[in-house]
Amino acid sequence: QELLRESGGALVQPGESLKLSCVYYGINFQNEAIGWFRQVPSKEREGVSAIGDSLAGEKTYYADTVKGRFTISRDNAKKTAYLQLNDLKPEDTAVYYCARGIRSGYYDYRLTEDEFMHWGQGTQVTVSS
């Protein structure tokens, strides 16, 4: 049964922005940490960002490659996590996935795949002029 669904991917030009959404179809969204990853063909999935659950104070994490350009947030009432992508570059082109964290409460995420589960189907982001 589907638990997470991403949307918002598109074809944009360098320097433009996008906002990705990750809708959660479970019950206690506020108790779930959510991570965003991306993947290009023939490469491993790369951790982009994560946001902790309410117990963790919704602490945020970012990969160095996106720090200062991407912003993760969540709306617990809408059971949705967001990833705002600003100043997009061609190297940001990838399929973006969201997933739920395997730990609740305070936990320092390293943005590795083994820390997350129940992956969505992904949404394509293409940055090209």
Image: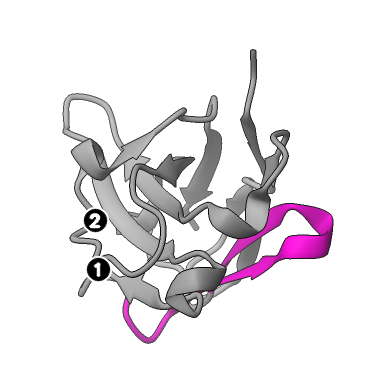
Residue drawn 42% across the image and 78% down it? 59
Query: As displayed, is residue 23 above or below residue 76?
Result: above
Residues in magenta?
A: 67-85
Report the amino acid beneath label 1. Ala
Q: Which mark is residue 111?
A: 2
Residue drawn 26% across the image and 26% down it? 41
**Color scheme of the displayed model:** one colour
**Element type where label 1 sits in the image:** loop
Left or right? Give the position of 5 relative to 51: right
Magenta stretch holds residue 73: yes
Q: Which mark is residue 41?
A: none
How far apart are labels 1 and 2 at the CA level?
8 Å
| Label 2 Cα crowd, 10 Å radius (few <14 / some 14-19 / many 20+) | many
Q: Position of residue 97 (x, y in %)?
A: 46, 39
Pointers 1 and 2 in contact (CB under 8 A)?
A: yes
Residue drawn 56% across the image and 55% down it? 31
Q: Position of residue 124 (x, y in %)?
A: 53, 37
Magenta stretch holds residue 123: no
| Label 1 Cα crowd, 10 Å radius (few <14 / some 14-19 / many 20+) | some
Report the amino acid beneath label 2. Leu
* Residue bearing mark 1: 63
Which quadrant holds residue 117? top left
Q: Position of residue 98 (x, y in %)?
A: 49, 43
Which quadrant holds residue 44? top left
Of the residues under marks 1 and 2, which one precedes in the sequence? Answer: 1
